[in-house]
Image (tube, coloured by chain):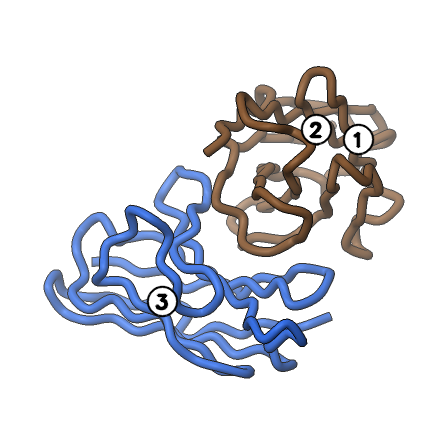
Amino acid sequence: QVPLVQSGAEVKKPGSSLKVSCKASGGTFKSLTITWVRQAPGQGLEWVGGVIPVFNIPVYAQKFQGRVSITTDESTSTVYMEWSSLRSGDTGIYYCAIRDGYNFHAFPVWGQGTMVAVSS
Amino acid sequence: DIVMTQTPLSLSVTPGQPASISCKSSQSLLHTDGKTYLHWYLQQPGQSPQLLIHEVSNRLSGVPDRFSGSGSGTDFTLKISRVEAEDVGIYYCMQTRQLPLTFGGGTRVEI
């Protein structure tokens, strides 16, 4: 299994920008499918979107389309999720997860999560 | 979008006793490739979710055999034959039959 390490917790003001990262160690980055899942405070799991690096075409849940941008850097085996203008509703823990293969099925490896708190 | 509905919302179980969680989908999760894309995750307190079972009934390596999954089409069940203290947490079903991926609302299991 390829361990995942996510960037640290962030506290931001509404309207600010943010980029969080998820780095895959070992393995072959190009053989992976990567996904992001949000957990709002006290809530369940919600799929944000994902990307297959070899195709490099991100897909998003409609709720998050236009709100976040998922990008990859093959040279560092890192996936990023970026906001250009945060809102309080973006507050939550964001998990990245990966699987071998080019499809969005069961994800066996998860990062530790990145807490994003948006408050004025 | 495929809606996933889990019941019950919470479950209080005595150690050594069985537990069962139901998950129903608004559409069949049977893919044209013959596989059914329903998976179960456990989120232990303060932890990231962990995959327990994939494609209805396949336990991930290292998952105890007291966990079992069954079902087909739109109705699925996760069973724990004898609950242990380490099994506390929130269990989620998830479908990957089609995008967007969707999760059930979760079932909290407590001892």
What quarter of the picture does the C terminus of chain A occupy? top right
Residue drawn at (18%, 61%) of the image = B83
- Name of the residue lying farthest toward the left: B16
Mark 2 to mark 3 CA distance (whole Å): 35 Å
Q: Is A15 positioned to the left or the right of B80 in the image? A: right
On the image, the x and y values in percent for residue A36 come to: 65, 42
The disc at residue B10 is 3
Q: Residue at x 64, y 22 (%)?
A: A10
Q: Are marks 1 and 3 in contact (CB under 8 Å)?
A: no
Q: Residues within 10 Å of mark 1 (few under 14, many from 20)?
A: some
Q: Is residue A75 left or right of residue B65?
A: right
Q: Could you tell me which residue is drawn at 79 percent across and 50 percent down?
A: A60
**Gap in Å between the C-alphas at discs 2 and 1?**
6 Å
Q: Label 3 is placed on what type of residue?
A: Ser
Task: Give the labeled residue for mark 1.
Answer: A71
Circle 2 packing at 10 Å, graded few (<14), some (14-19), many (20+), is many
Secondary structure, mark 2, is strand
User: Label 3 neighbourhood size at 10 Å, few (<14), some (14-19), many (20+)?
Assistant: some
Which label was assigned to residue A79?
2
- Give the colour in which the image draws chain B: blue
Is A113 above or below relative to B27? Answer: above
The answer to whether mark 2 and mark 1 are in CB contact below 8 A is yes
Which element carries disc 1, helix, strand or loop?
A: strand
Tell me the shade of chain A: brown
Residue under the image location 17 percent in, 55 percent down: B84
